[in-house]
Image: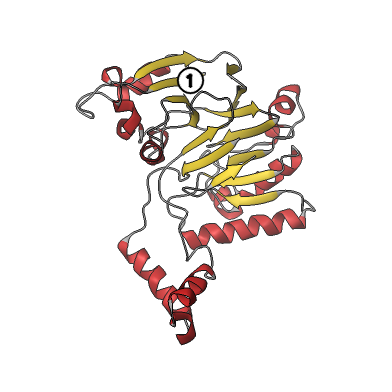
Amino acid sequence: MRIRFWGARGSLPSPLLPSQVREKIMAALRRARPEDLADSKSIERFARGLPPWLFGTVGGNTSCVSLEADGLDGLIVFDCGSGMRELGKARRASPNYHVFMSHFHWDHLQGLPFFGPAFSPASSLDFYSPRQGFEGDLAGLMRGPYSPIGLHDLPAKTSFSCLEGPVSLGPASVSFKKMNHPGGSYSYRVECGGKSFIYATDVELEVQDFIRSEENAAFFTGADAIAIDAQYTPMEAIEKHSWGHSPYSMAAEFAVSWGIRRLILFHHDPTSDDRKLHEMLRSASRYLRHIGADGVSVSLAAEGREVVL
């Protein structure tokens, strides 16, 4: 099972501004010594020794994650944020896309009108959601005067399935659970080849999410990895209570509580720069050690990053 992140921001795309690029370059140059710039090998060694927030970027596109697995006909895709455009550019050879929608806020839809494979008659896009009538929600995104082409005019073959329970896609089984978010949001769990992955964007974790009910236990227990909303610091979460997002500390506690071995911090605030996000990652790692959960690994969702289970 391979999970790849094409967009991990929330609210709106947040590209690096020219001033931020310049600041990164200047910060890197200030760290350099003459011997670091002596030749191409020295420069490469110096660059790779820079901190992650400086040498690279988390990226600015909004939520879109793909999953591929042996025997799966095409890709499973979670959400249609602006990162979906990058997915379309990178995987035009894949003809089949099984798209599971968490909810229908703009930042999870923005990429659909610009998804290259949707404009190929050789492609198929199968959309899934537990929301009744969601086909109309997607069609409303792609209509005049906002779009020159309608959803049902796309050359690709499209279908729309309203989920009432788990769905099987060849060797993969996909189940869902409603989470706490304004207007509602659904998390998905994929089981395939003895591995499991949970996509849990846009959730404000509550006490009830930690209660060992039969429903919670069946959905969360023992997943190999979870990409979960960790948009805020603990202080920001207090200030923005009921906004529908979680702090990294609660995401860490949640992973520990349900025996999830790999925690991926997701749905980054668009105002958080790379340095702040990596500081949050370090804080989450320290927090896990503090609560005695050294067995849980934690990382940041970043554009282009691949997780293999």
Residue closest to the eye, 208 or 17 = 17
Q: Is residue 5 left or right of residue 87?
A: right
For disc 1, the neighbor class at 10 Å (few under 14, some 14 to 19, many from 20) is many
Q: Is residue 273 above or below residue 185?
A: below
**What is the three-letter code of the residue carrying label 1?**
Tyr
Q: Is residue 176 left or right of residue 258?
A: left
The colour scheme of the drawn protein is secondary structure
For disc 1, the marked residue is 128
Location of residue 207 by image quarter: top right
How many marks can you see? 1
Relative image position of residue 127 (x, y in whole percent): 44, 21
Q: Is residue 266 above or below residue 292?
A: above
Disc 1, SS: strand
Q: Is residue 249 above or below residue 182?
A: below
Residue found 31% across the figure and 22% down from its top: 140
Relative image position of residue 71 (x, y in whole percent): 58, 25
Relative image position of residue 270 (x, y in whole percent): 43, 50
Location of residue 306 by image quarter: top right
Q: Is residue 165 above or below residue 103?
A: above
Q: Quadrant of the C terminus?
A: top right
Q: Quadrant of the N terminus?
A: top right
Residue found 36% across the figure and 65% down from its top: 21
Relative image position of residue 93 (x, y in whole percent): 40, 32
Residue closest to the eye, 251 or 171 = 171
